[in-house]
Image: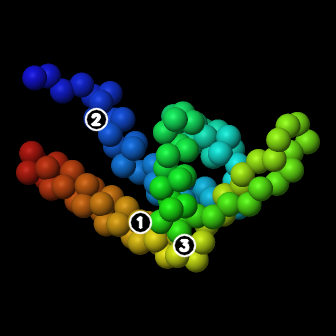
Amino acid sequence: MELKIENTKAQMRKGVLELCVLSIISQEEAYPTDIINKLKESKLIVVEGTLYPLLNRLKDAELLEYTWKESKSGPPRKYYQITGQGGEFLEGLRETWKELDHAVNQSQNNTKSNKK
């Protein structure tokens, strides 16, 4: 069976999506469309069908909460904020990311030195 790079890239993006979403919301409360736009800017293409289940899962885990705000152009909108527990969880994810980044870089450096 041939592995396709696009499938692997998609799985890697999904793996860091929770970290990225929590990081965005930790900076300021966010409306889902704003989150999607920021993810697209970072080349983490996400559609609503992916984001909303993640937001609900994070809310159910008490890592996020939301408030309704009136909109000038339509019905009220949900704006998400990170909770104290969510902030602690995010710090754990960031630490794990640093460890993974270090491990990947270390393994690449070891591979390069072995080829010399």
- Identified at 34% across, 43% down, the residue is 12
Compared to residue 95, the image places residue 23 above or below, namely above
Asked whether 98 or 50 is in front, the reply is 50
Disc on the earlier residue, 3 or 2: 2
Q: Nearer the viewer, mark 3 or mark 2?
A: 3
- Residue 26 visible, this angle: no
Q: Pinpoint residue 60: horizontal percent, then vertical percent.
A: 50, 62
Disc on the earlier residue, 1 or 3: 3
Q: Is residue 115 left or right of residue 95?
A: left
- Identified at 41% across, 66% down, the residue is 93
Please give the residue where the numbered disc 2 appears in the rendered image.
8
Badge 2 local density, few (<14 within 10 Å), some, or many (20+)? few
Please give the residue where the numbered disc 1 appears in the rendered image.
93
Mark 2: secondary structure: helix
Label 2 sits on what residue type? Answer: Thr
Compared to residue 92, the image places residue 101 above or below, namely above
Badge 3 local density, few (<14 within 10 Å), some, or many (20+)? some
Disc on the earlier residue, 2 or 1: 2
Compared to residue 61, the image places residue 78 above or below, namely above
Q: Pinpoint residue 75: horizontal percent, then vertical percent.
A: 82, 41
Query: Which residue is most to the right?
Result: 72
Label 3 sits on what residue type? Answer: Gly
- Identified at 57% across, 36% down, the residue is 48
Q: Pinpoint residue 20: horizontal percent, then vertical percent.
A: 51, 53
Label 1 sits on what residue type? Answer: Leu
Compared to residue 78, the image places residue 95 above or below, namely below
Please give the residue where the numbered disc 3 appears in the rendered image.
87
